[in-house]
Amino acid sequence: MNLRAKFLFLGIFFMVFMPARSAFADDLKSVLQKLDVAAKNFHTTTADVEFDTIQTDPIPDTDVQTGIAYYERKGNSFEMASHIHTHNNGPSQKTLIFSGGVLRISDTGKASDAKTYSNFSKYQGYLMLGFGASGKELQEKWDMTYLGTEKIDGVMTDKLELVAKDPAFRKNVPKVTIWLDTARAVSLKQRFDEGEGQAYICHYADIKVNQGVPGDAFTFNAGK
């Protein structure tokens, strides 16, 4: 390829692709601005949830848990809980609760059996990912790429690829993809790629925003 042909090729490349990249940057900015607005009005969320742990290497395998998830935000205070009802089609009472900066997990649903992880507040920004987080809060934690729109359960969502700015988190989870309903500041789907053929997918349905949560949402033995 002679020099003139190279310059012609580069000119065509920039004319074709650069406007698209610029448009996607504008779309990301628009998504973050919408989240800033919606997050101000976000208080609670209740949703049916399915957690799929997927392994493609060395042996393909899928682990499926279903249940109900609760999120509540009051200013800087944030709580979340997942009450698992089924595990691979069998009954389950596994309960995960994050409250007051402490994460507690019980496989039996009983407080006496719960494992406690204190000083977990530094991970709060990752737990509230796609549930009440503003665009500004996402920018503080993630480097983001806009991937366009995609319909999830009949809802048109904005799809973002996230790479954590925290190197320790990024080492364990190199990439996260979320499908956002920006009007409500909630995500309908999240995919955490852990590398080496491992991924963790969260799918939320029947999402109810700002309709309150049960009084026992953030306690063990709830949701029976």
Image (cartoon, grey):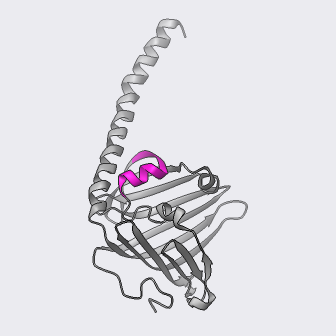
Q: Is residue 131 left or right of residue 174?
A: left
Quadrant of the rendered image containing residue 41: bottom left
Q: Judge whether residue 146 is colored magenta.
A: yes
Q: Judge whether residue 181 is colored magenta.
A: no
Compared to residue 179, the image places residue 104 above or below, namely below
Q: Is residue 8 left or right of residue 58?
A: left
Compared to residue 217, the image places residue 134 above or below, namely above
Percent across and percent down for residue 24 are: 36, 40
Residue drawn at (65%, 61%) of the image: 56
Percent across and percent down for residue 95 are: 53, 83
Residue drawn at (36%, 64%) of the image: 132
Percent across and percent down for residue 208 are: 31, 75
Q: Residue furthest right?
A: 58
Q: Is residue 174 left or right of residue 70?
A: right
**Total labels drawn:** 0
Quadrant of the rendered image containing residue 18: top left
Residue drawn at (55%, 52%) of the image: 175
Quadrant of the rendered image containing residue 120: bottom right
User: Between 2 and 198, which is closer to the camera in this rendering?
Assistant: 198
Compared to residue 146, the image places residue 184 above or below, namely below
What span is colored magenta in the figure?
A: 134-147
Percent across and percent down for residue 105 are: 58, 80
